[in-house]
Amino acid sequence: MSEAPLLEIEGLRASVAGKEILTGLSLTVRAGEVHAIMGPNGSGKSTLANTLMGNPRYAVTGGTARFRGEPLEGLAPDERARRGLFLAFQYPVAVPGVTVVNFLRQAVNAVRGEELPVREFRQNLFARMEQLRVDRDFARRYLNDGFSGGEKKRAEMLQLAMLQPRLAVLDETDSGLDIDALRTVADGVNALMNEEMGLLLITHYQRLLNYIRPRFVHVLMGGRIVRSGGPELAEELEASGYDAMEPAAPTA
Ligand SMILES: Nc1ncnc2c1ncn2[C@@H]1O[C@H](COP(=O)(O)OP(=O)(O)OP(=O)(O)O)[C@@H](O)[C@H]1O
Ligand SMILES: [Mg+2]
């Protein structure tokens, strides 16, 4: 008996501001798998993340995306989150006046659809902070307000740990991660990843993939996946660049 894949995307087309960006993208992610998506600037990586989260500015014009066997189309972003989809963004917004701890409590309650007793929440949070080696003072700061790149990543990893999604989509792109931030992401992901969970890691950094070993690497160009392979594909890209990537012959 086989369970439905976590994510099954077939021939997905999506437009933003009247322009088609995703042009027939197909991708399947199963539980326990880490997939990396690499691709040049403007190829549609963040558009894929936005479309998966149900951002209303991104219109699906063709194809399908199923999450745990159910079509995502028509589901509001919060409903997608409740079903276990987690998206972390390239440019997180600052939320002055909302502390990390309060933000996390709201997020956890929203995803669970019920109020978790404060004591239970705090115990869980402190255990996760210890696991991710985050200082306790951190929880009292305002979310992303004056956070360094590494601290933003730490807040994101804490959110991931508290929500325990089935599929996490991390859009890391060109957000200027230094080596510490890369390690924060890598250590966090490696501590949290399990056989039930899938991970879609959008990155420009071959280096990140030395710390988080993906099972599959995909090259996204012109709004679709043109090559898929193992970790060696990321090394090939590093050596020869995207120009050398021949688009795959179209399949019937
Ligand atoms: N909200 C938007 N409004 C207008 N155009 C958009 C919007 N979002 C994406 N686009 C356009 O879609 C194309 C793909 O952008 P996208 O952000 O998906 O690229 P990317 O692969 O994530 O690039 P990068 O590596 O620079 O992060 C670009 O031409 C971009 O200008
Ligand atoms: Mg992007």
Image (cartoon, helix red, strand yellow):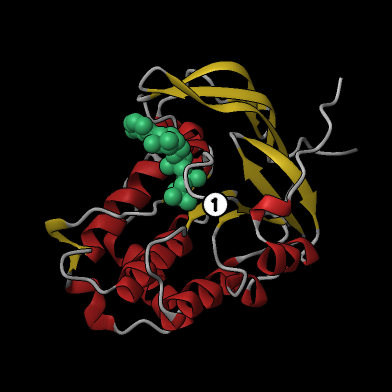
Q: Is residue 169 above or below residue 124?
A: above
Residue 213 visible? The answer is: yes
Q: Is residue 212 above or below residue 5?
A: below
- Furthest-left residue in this view: 97
- Give the residue displayed 37% in from the left and 72% down from the top: 154
Residue at the right extreme? 1
Q: Position of residue 238 (x, y in %)?
A: 66, 68
Closer to the camera in the image, 161 or 224: 224
Q: Is residue 204 above or below residue 211?
A: above
Foreground: 223 or 180?
223
Work out which quarter of the rendered image holds the N terminus and state it. Answer: top right
**Which residue is rendered at x = 52% and y = 23% of the image?**
14
Considering depth in this image, is 69 or 177 the residue closer to the camera?
Answer: 177
Which image quarter holds the C terminus?
top right
Question: At label 1, which amino acid type do we have?
Answer: Ala
Query: In screen coordinates, is 202 left or right of 235?
Result: left
Q: Residue at x 73, y 69 (%)?
A: 235
Q: Which residue corresponds to mark 1?
A: 168
Give the image location of residue 81, x and y in percent: 45, 40
Answer yes or no: is residue 29 visible. no
Residue 174, picture quadrant: bottom left
Q: Is residue 11 left or right of residue 143?
A: right
